[in-house]
Amino acid sequence: MPLGRLLPPFFEPPAVRAPYATRSKDSRGRLFEEPESATRTCYSRDRDRIIHSAAFRRLKHKTQVFVQHEGDYYRTRLTHSLEVAQIARSVARVLAVDEDLAETVALAHDLGHTPFGHAGEEALNGATEAFGGFDHNAHALKLVTQIEHRYAEFDGLNLTWETLEGMVKHNGPITAQKKPIPGPIASFNARWPLDLATWPGLEAQIAAMADDIAYINHDIDDGLRAELFTIADLREAPIVGPQVAEIVSRYGDLELSRMIGEIVRQLMSTLIVDLISETRCRLEENAPRSVADVRSRDRATAAFSDVLAPQVRALKEFMFTRMYRHPHVMGSMNRAKDVVTALFEAFSSDPAKLPPDWAKNCGAPGDGRTVSIVRDYIAGMTDNYALLEYGRVFHKQIAL
């Protein structure tokens, strides 16, 4: 399909969902039986449970790229999740699949992230490598099935099978061929199989693609505002370079906010239209008659086209070099890693340093039970709280 093919104006979604959509009436249900809502589908109820969870609220103070204190303009995990949810819901509507489920998976996809973004995850994974390491998708599953305590009758949020499947598999099938399946996923799968070797439904695949689209665009926005690269630099970037040239040709020199707005608007439209067009092509080619058909495919159904996909990869490489490996970002992220590593070592060697409600469940210093509890405790921290705990434990402050 050609890039930039426009959708029909004033698009009206079909009155009846597509045959390959996930239908709430056919849900595999919840691990613990409970009456369903009379006013919401099971997937919209899942969405509401996620929004009201403590883990979701904490995303407000968990960083994307910049540490939380650097400025109000920059994205946090919370604002990113909201942007992903908006894109996922819009694309799901056009493709006539379940909007509530796509939005739910989008809102939940970052629940398991540590403080300080990927730097925090790398540090926590390294510190716990001998005990299975750390995986943010696995931790998200543990949060919504064990750690959240909001209900008298069960741990977790008791989400539907389809939401849990989407949270775990939105990036594709999970097998032990390349690396071991993370412990929390393996143990839950033994209890209630999530069909790990198959693709998830189309709604979860859409949420994964919406994540890509959102972070590419908002990282360009944040990177320009932080002066990590310039508009002139973007002229050399894949996909966005020609768009920048066209904007300058049409409008001349714009103030930065207007320029960023035009760049993001055009780039986001290009990515979304290509995603919809390519996904429609794959649906027409495979003609799935059920969500089971979508799951059984040997490749993703929601995807960028063969023309755009390598350009997206090249744009990510551009952003990795110019933004994620920028000295300003690297300096603060390396110090953030030190904070996470030091906290892990302090708590695992002396569990009494943990708050009492966490310390009481620990075993001996350094044993598997203690490491698991310390890992969960640190993973749940916000950026601010991690720095406060560092100050409490070590009686000194660290500037990121």
Image (tube, rainbow, N blue to C red):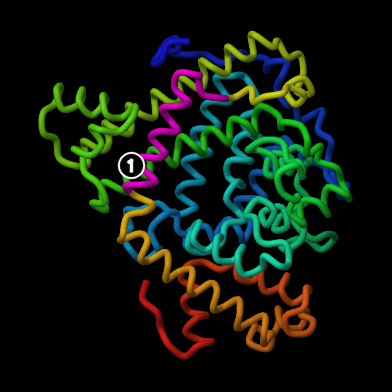
Side (left or right) of 75 relative to 101: left
Residue 314 falls in image quadrant: top left
Residue bearing mark 1: 220
Seen in the picture, residue 3 relative to 239 is either above or below; the reply is above
The magenta-colored residue range is: 303-322
Residue at 71%, 48% in the rendered image: 179
**Secondary element at tag 1:** helix
At label 1, which amino acid type do we have? Ile
Side (left or right) of 165 relative to 118: right
Relative to the observer, which residue lies in front, 331 or 170? 331
Observer able to see residue 39: no
The outermost residue toward the left is 252
Residue 280 falls in image quadrant: top right
Residue 398: horizontal and vertical position, in percent?
A: 40, 79
Residue 37 falls in image quadrant: top right
Residue 173: horizontal and vertical position, in percent?
A: 72, 36
